[in-house]
Amino acid sequence: MPSPNEVYVKCDELDNVPYPNKENWLFEIELLKKELSLNASVLQVGCMNGTRMIALLKARPDLKITGLDMEKDMIEASKINLEKLGFKAELIHSDITEPQPVSGFDYVVCLNNTLGYIPEQEKAIENMKELGKTVILSVYGEKFTNKLAQEYFKSINLELKGIENNVFHTKEFVNIKRYTEEEVEKWNGKIIETPIGYFCIIKQ
């Protein structure tokens, strides 16, 4: 059985995942490059090993990025990967559903359907709203079909056991949700369609 770290890191290995997922990942970065204001402070929820923070800092070195992850090993991996390339970012080992030691960010971003892996999703969103002026959520939607889901989860070492009410149950350790447009609309943000889902920009 793969560990959470072995699964989550593979989400960012773009040559390993199906093309629609790679396209979606790259679309997110391009959109953030344009959306984030100059010299903005940004908290990434679910920073994993720092791959997306590094991609953003390469494109937008003006950004002040903080990464948050509940897996201590991921925080350590982020630190190593950032230092290796000469990038600087603050790192926080914490669970987004719990009270946080920081706040006052210009943006809080939660990318690549990370929200779909969090059991207490509404609590996570509320906490994100408390931490930043603008919350940006990127989630998988109806275009993330059952067939694509099977291919994707296999590519990140998860075996799909079943699908119920847009929740993917795996044989390993996690359930993952995809979102309907109606669900995303309830977050009361600006919605942008992505290759396989939705970008929701919630301004406070």
Image: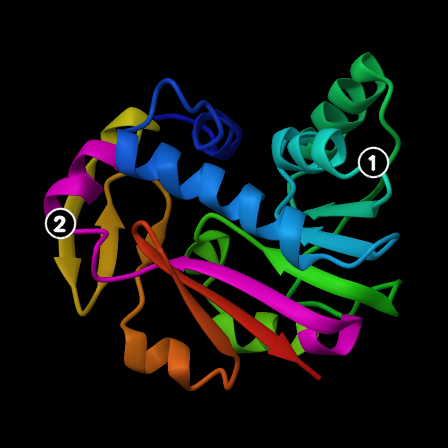
Question: What residue do we see at 88% from left, 31% from top?
Answer: 88
**Label annotation for residue 146:** 2
Observer-nearest of 104 and 118: 104
Q: CA distance from mark 1 to mark 2?
A: 38 Å
Residue position marked by numbered label 1 in the rendering: 61
Q: Which of the two residues, 166 or 12, is positioned nearer the viewer here?
A: 12
Q: Is residue 189 above or below residue 89?
A: below
Magenta residue span: 129-153
Number of marks in the image?
A: 2
Type of amino acid under label 2? Asn
How far across and down, in percent of the image, does residue 151 sit? Answer: 19, 33
Nearest to N terminus: mark 1 or mark 2: 1
Q: Where is residue 52, by image quadrant?
A: top right
Residue 107 shows which numbered tag?
none
Amino acid type at mark 1? Pro
Q: Residue at x 37, y 43 (%)?
A: 173
